[in-house]
Image (cartoon, grey):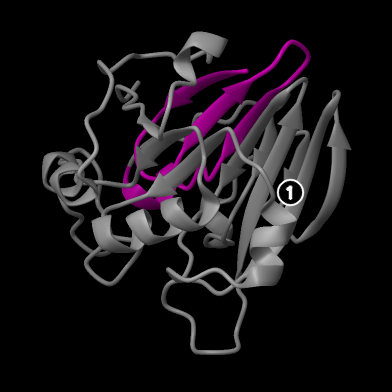
Amino acid sequence: MEFQYYGGNCIKITTKNAVFVVDDTLKSLGAKSITKPENVAVLTVLPDVAAMPEARLVITDPGEYEVSEVSIFGIAARAHMDEAGKKSATIYKFLYDDTRVCVLGHVYPDLTEDQLEEIGTIDILIVPVGGNGYTLDGVGALHIIKQIEPKLVIPTHYDDKTLKYEVPQQPLADVLRGLSMEPKEAVAKFKPKPADYGEGVQLVVLEKQ
């Protein structure tokens, strides 16, 4: 698996046989969609119709999916701005070869035991951190990181002057201070290797493409 970051909560995950684009809501943020017709689009929340990516397959709901040797599990979750009892967001778990990836999306910062059981053991956790009431902040992200205990964490959805966020987001540097985690050197593309899985949780910052 190879990971690239495009701003907002948008991550491209490339495998040998397919390209998965997660949360390409870039149109709604004043940017250009990166999803190509041959890609698989995965959405943790439903965007406006005008911002829906055009793809060969669009995954938007909880459930189990098998695409190009990648197993995807969608888990219903309370969105960060949902009322108690509502679940309008979807957490996704990707399984490919021996790599297990969890994409949180804009969830409420307290997962249930049932959700944690469905998520299971995770190698890489992709988590939004911009806060300000719209999504997880450093405190909420750290709480969920401790709940899931991944090997690597990739932060998304932080301050970006080129994007028109609905709610201003916190700068990544401020968030990282709250996480009390020292990031590895930022990279444009990340392809995890066994050496990247050290003791404790490692933080990987992706340069925006």
Figure quadrant of the C terminus = top left
56 or 130: which is nearer to us? 130
Residue 90 visible in the snapshot:
yes
**Badge 1 is on which residue?**
59
* Image location (x, y in percent) of residue 70: 80, 29
174 or 156: which is nearer to us? 174
Figure quadrant of the N terminus = top right
* Image location (x, y in percent) of residue 23: 53, 45
Relative horizontal placement of residue 203, taking residue 125 as reference (left or right):
left
For image coordinates 31% across by 25% down, the residue present is 208
* Image location (x, y in percent) of residue 169: 20, 55
Magenta residue check for 10: yes
- Give the answer, above or below, for where 82 lies relative to 131: below
* Image location (x, y in percent) of residue 197: 49, 21
- Give the answer, above or below, for where 57 lies relative to 46: above
Relative horizontal placement of residue 48, taking residue 145 as reference (left or right):
right
Relative horizontal placement of residue 162, taking residue 61 as reference (left or right):
left
Decide: few, some or many residues near mark 1? Use Cα within 10 Å; few <14, some 14-19, many ≥20: some
Residue 193 visible in the snapshot:
no
Quarter of image, res 162: top left
Range of magenta residues: 1-30
166 or 96: which is nearer to us? 96
Magenta residue check for 11: yes
For image coordinates 69% across by 49% down, the residue present is 120
Relative horizontal placement of residue 47, taking residue 26 as reference (left or right):
right
Numbered marks: total: 1
For image coordinates 86% across by 24% down, the residue present is 69
Report the residue that reaches farthest toward the bottom.
84
For image coordinates 25% across by 46% down, the residue present is 158
Q: Secondary structure at mark 1?
A: strand
Residue type (three-letter) at the residue carrying disc 1: Ile
Quarter of image, res 133: bottom left
